[in-house]
Image (cartoon, rainbow, N blue to C red):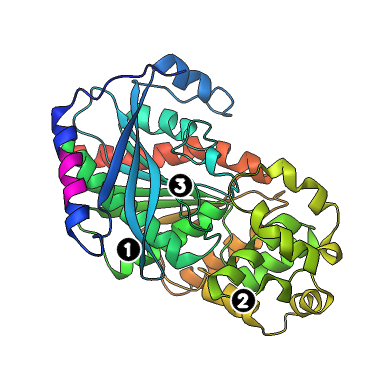
């Protein structure tokens, strides 16, 4: 699959060694400090081309890419924790066109995170963006990849922290690899990652990140108004998995017993099922139970009737629809999406545009949820490329 290479870059070895020393000497570790860099080998043009054969529009693959796993320090509720992510570098191109941070969708399995060998996100992004001259950064998120903490599913602040600290770590690794730095930062995310893009852009506009200049963002099939739109739509479409995962994550985050929301037998078994070692297919028997077979009747009644509770308060706290972007952001959605309501993009767009926000909304047509990101890749690449082309002409 890959051509694995030795780390022949003495500068990188020296850099990582000094990072280890820095981490050992500081207490607590500085956010974004690199713990370890693993070389994952090379994906060549032939492999990259095959990887994106399924896209509805052909994208030219220009060069091979180098893959690295970065393990770094971030924070979780003010406590230092380890996280990881995938770094993609265009091979033989010392000056990159910019940095693309891709924020992935729902994933319950650590071994399938971007930095892991069995990744479900990372190869397409390497082909679309990395082979065309961009440095690509894919955080695993806390709770996936090398992280041993519970997954922070649809929790805004931990996602922002893990992403920004991955970007900090990436800058340090790039310096160690002597990559000619380009501060232009572009964000793209799908599904959960669409929510993450909105959260990260909002954070960057409140406090820019040293070494980066956010230029453009793309959110595909994102959930933004979690209480007002996302949850009711998931209930109507019987998307039990998304709802159960979110309830569990919010309960753990707030220290609320799982049996206050889930039936006792479910609450007892749920932590083991969500420990990162299980595949999505293993959830199928649970999903057959339906909402009444998973949740306590009183909790289910409260969310169906939109009564105020710890859970609805958490949904409000983690929503990302009511703000006004200054950096251009495109919202892509599909009209036949059974996972995320098209109204999520509409509501975000209307709120922001009414207040002068730099947001546009784009329909991808009559597509299902999983199809939307494939159709958005070519559109996004052209939009990102147009920025770098204009930059060259100045």
Chain part drawn in magenta = 15-21
Q: Residue at x 85, y 63 (%)?
A: 293
Report crowding for label 3: few under 14, some 14 to 19, many 20 or more residues within 10 A (C-alpha): many
Sequence-wise, which precedes: disc 1 or disc 2?
1
Up/down of 57 relative to 303, above or below? above
- Identify the residue position indicated by label 3 in the image: 140
Sequence-wise, which precedes: disc 3 or disc 1?
3
Mark whose residue sits in front, 2 or 3? 2
- x, y percent for residue 212: 24, 53
The furthest residue to the bottom: 308
In the rendered image, which quarter is residue 126 located in?
top left
Please give left or right for residue 345 compared with residue 242 in the image. Answer: left
Up/down of 346 relative to 375, above or below? below
- x, y percent for residue 206: 31, 70
* Cα separation between marks 3 and 1: 19 Å
Mark whose residue sits in front, 3 or 1? 3
- x, y percent for residue 65: 34, 25
The tag on residue 204 is: 1
Is 83 in front, or is 315? 83
Queried whether the magenta region covers residue 343, the answer comes back as: no
- Identify the residue position indicated by label 2 in the image: 256
Please give left or right for residue 166 compared with residue 344 in the image. Answer: left
Main SS class of the magenta portion in the image: helix
Up/down of 185 relative to 359, above or below? above
Give the quadrant of the C terminus. Answer: top left
């Amino acid at each position: 699959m890959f051509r694995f290479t030795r780390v022949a870059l003495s500068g990188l070895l020296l850099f990582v060694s000094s990072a280890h020393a820095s981490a050992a000497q500081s207490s607590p570790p500085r956010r974004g400090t690199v713990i370890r860099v693993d070389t994952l080998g090379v994906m060549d043009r032939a492999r990259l081309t095959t990887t994106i054969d399924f896209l509805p529009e052909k994208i030219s693959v220009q060069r091979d890419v180098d893959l690295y796993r970065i393990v770094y320090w971030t924070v979780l509720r003010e406590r230092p924790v380890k996280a990881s992510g995938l770094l993609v570098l265009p091979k033989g191109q010392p000056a990159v066109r910019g940095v693309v941070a891709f924020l992935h969708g729902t994933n319950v399995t650590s071994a399938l995170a971007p930095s892991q060998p069995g990744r479900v996100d990372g190869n397409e992004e390497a082909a679309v963006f990395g082979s065309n001259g961009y440095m690509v950064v894919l955080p695993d998120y806390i709770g996936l990849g090398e992280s041993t903490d519970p997954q922070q599913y649809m929790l805004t602040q931990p996602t922002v922290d893990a992403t920004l600290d991955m970007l900090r770590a990436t800058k340090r690794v790039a310096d160690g690899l002597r990559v000619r730095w380009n501060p232009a930062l572009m964000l793209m995310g799908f599904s959960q990652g669409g929510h993450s893009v909105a959260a990260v852009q909002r954070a960057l506009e409140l406090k820019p990140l040293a070494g980066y200049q956010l230029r453009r963002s793309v959110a595909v099939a994102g959930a933004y108004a979690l209480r007002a739109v996302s949850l009711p739509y998931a209930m109507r479409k019987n998307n039990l998995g998304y709802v159960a995962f979110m309830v569990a994550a919010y309960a753990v985050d707030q220290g609320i017993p799982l049996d206050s929301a889930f039936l006792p037998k479910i609450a007892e078994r749920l932590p083991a099922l969500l420990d990162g070692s299980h595949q999505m297919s293993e959830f199928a028997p649970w999903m057959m139970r339906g909402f009444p077979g998973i949740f306590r009747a009183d909790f289910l009644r409260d969310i169906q009737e939109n009564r105020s509770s710890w859970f609805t308060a958490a949904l409000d706290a983690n929503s990302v629809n009511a703000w006004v972007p200054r950096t251009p952001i495109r919202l892509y959605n599909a009209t036949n999406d059974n996972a995320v309501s098209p109204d999520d993009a509409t509501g975000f767009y209307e709120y922001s545009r009414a207040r002068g926000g730099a947001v546009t909304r784009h329909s991808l047509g009559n597509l299902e949820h999983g199809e939307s990101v494939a159709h958005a890749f070519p559109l996004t690449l052209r939009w990102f490329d147009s920025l770098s082309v204009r930059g060259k002409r100045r």
